[in-house]
Amino acid sequence: MSSDLEDAIVTALHAKAGTAPTPALPRLGAPAPRAPLGRRLAPVAAAVAMVVAVGAAVFVLTPRDDQPLTPPATTTSTAPSPDTLAPGEVYYSLRLSTVAEGVIRETQVWQPRDRAGQWRQAVAQGTTIKDGRVVPSGGAVGAPDGGVCYPATTGGAEACATPATWFNPTVDFLATAPRDPAVIRRELDTMATEAVEDAGQSSADYVPALEVRMIGELLAGNGVPRDLSSALREVVETMPGIVVTTGMRTVAGDQGTGYSISAPRVGPQTVIFDDDDQYLGSPKEAVYHGVAPGLGQPPSRMLD
Amino acid sequence: MATHVKGHASATLTAVLEQQWIPLIRLATVLADADTALDIVQDCYEAVWRLQPPVTDAEHFVAYLRRAVINRSRSRLRRLRTLRRFLAQARPPVDEPAADHALLVAEQHRELIAHIDHLPARQREVIVLRYYCGLSELETAATAGISPGTVKSATHRAIAALRRAMKEFPDEQ
């Protein structure tokens, strides 16, 4: 027996189906060129125009009789590598972070590949997320709108010259960093141990928790190559004491596999990955990466 | 029964493709969105036309087409997930709805669709096949390429998740 909810599902799905375009079936076998899939999908601004154009086109259905009968292959992602930017393009990231109980901050960052270049950010704050974006409330957020030598806000030479590390990565550092999880783990252990000791903590419990936290910070940033993201996931999932939770959701509701570790007096430190080793965020944050044609401009393509 | 003629589409193949054109676009719209539905179905038709499969059982062939649409919708969803968020931002703001029943119901359905879109891929596909296509558990299993047990559990989890998300539909005692 169907419930009210099931009835509503049926009605809602049919209502959505009713929004489908109803083009005539193109003549089977009629030749007409189609733009490559990646190009058709890439630009946000062209998305609507693309639908209209494709709808008007007659697509190629050229008979070929030498193909074995196999199910059509699933299309694979053709997203470009994060370390490939066209001239003038900048990295773009959108990060939703829980900064206090019930308060979410949205930070958009535009960052050039050149470390010394100009970067920009836009910050908003609110208590609700709608369509993946924070609904601003409570007035302006006091945050700088940009600077040079990300994440510095002043143009001093010192900021641009600070050595890049796992805890302070630059795009160039990420491109050339080790990919062997064992090597990464050793380097992170060294840095985290020093940091914990410098903070006056003697407990070794804080080291893996700090490593997970900083891996999350690194992955939330721009310019992380996909193979490095995979290696970092492996680092996390092989940590002693790590708790793995499937079906964990980010603050925006994206679902993946969560890796958590706790330490005294600090809450659980969690990173969530999707099936392709892309970092999604944590229960307190959600992260999206893309590429924009310039500072402050809407992203032209998303990378994850 | 149709026979396969090399280099020529069988009458059954052509007929099924013509007959399923709009239904598959609607299915793709439900699984993904209206903006990409046409692309998804066109891709499927291109692949099928290249293969020129012998259509000996129209019903099975329709299930095959649906599965192809499901596979393509899944990959498109992943790529377009973030794009859609931005496109949603570009939509004009909706005026505050009056306390009119039809509007409230429409808003409820919109919210329900949003929650269905956020279900894990398999649960979403099972929900669409069961409640939009009206397939039985066995038919859903055959179309989605999973076991009937998985269909049952995925449906149960999806309904439970939707019930939690939609406070208007409390557990029925």
Image (cartoon, coloured by chain):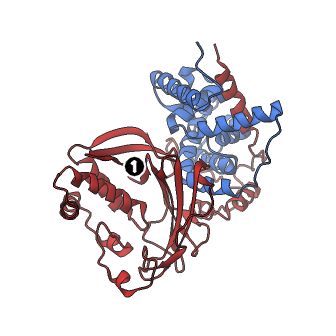
Chain colours: A red, B blue
Residue A232: where, in percent of width, then height?
30, 57
Number of other residues with Cα within 10 Å of mark 1, as a class: few under 14, some 14 to 19, many 20 or more:
many
Who is closer to the viewer here, A133 or B125? A133
Quarter of the image with the N terminus of chain B is: top right
Who is closer to the viewer here, A211 or A206? A206
Q: Residue at coordinates 53% horizontally, 45% vertically from top-left?
A: A72
Residue B120: where, in percent of width, then height?
50, 38
Please name the amino acid that badge 1 sits on. Phe
Residue A210: where, in percent of width, then height?
28, 56
Work out whether A268 lies above or below A87: above
Q: Residue at coordinates 69% horizontally, 27% vertically from top-left?
A: A8
Work out whether B33 lies above or below B155: below
Who is closer to the viewer here, A64 or A263? A263
Residue for badge 1: A273
Q: Is residue A88 left or right of residue A45?
A: left
In the rendered image, is residue A60 in sight?
no
Work out whether B74 lies above or below A90: above
Who is closer to the viewer here, A29 or A155? A155
- Quarter assignment of residue B169: top right
In the rendered image, is residue A301 in sight?
yes
In the orientation shown, which residue stands out farthest toward the bottom? Answer: A157
- Quarter assignment of residue B55: top right
Q: Residue at coordinates 77% horizontally, 34% vertically from top-left?
A: B104
The residue tagged with tag 1: helix, strand or loop? strand
Q: Is residue A67 left or right of residue B1?
A: left
Which of the chains bears the disc numbered 1? A
Residue A125: where, in percent of width, then height?
57, 57
Q: Is residue B13 left or right of residue A191?
A: right
Quarter of the image with the C terminus of chain B is: top right
Say how many tags the image has.
Answer: 1
